[in-house]
Image (cartoon, rainbow, N blue to C red):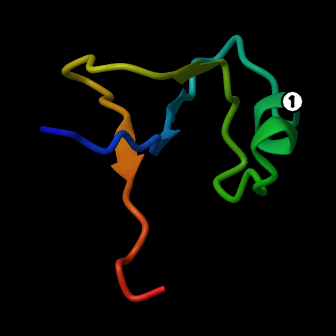
Amino acid sequence: MQTSRKIFRLEGVVQPYNWGGFNFIAKLLGKANAENKPQAELWFGAHDNAPSLVQIPSESS
């Protein structure tokens, strides 16, 4: 039996700790810091407080 393997993009969660900066993580992600909060860490994983999300492409394309 053959199974197909796929790679999916993970969406990390930005942690807005006071010691963070305002531009680096936003620029790295190519997104504006719309809330203008300090961005200290970008978490990837299954942490209860900020689990990553898996981006699943639509099957219609």
Whether residue 40 sits left or right of residue 49 in the image: it is right
Q: Amino acid at mark 1?
A: Phe
Q: Residue at x 75, y 43 (%)?
A: 29
Q: Residue at x 70, y 30 (%)?
A: 38
Whether residue 17 sits left or right of residue 19 in the image: it is left
23 w.r.t. 57: above or below: above
55 w.r.t. 16: above or below: below
| Quadrant into which the N terminus falls | top left
- Regarding mark 1 in the picture, which secondary structure is present there? helix
The spot of residue 27 in percent (x, y) is 87, 42
The spot of residue 5 in percent (x, y) is 36, 39
33 w.r.t. 19: above or below: below
Q: Which residue is mark 1?
A: 24
Tell which residue pokes out farthest to the left in this image: 1
Is residue 20 or residue 56 the one in the foreground? 56
Whether residue 44 sits left or right of residue 28 in the image: it is left
Q: Residue at x 74, y 51 (%)?
A: 33
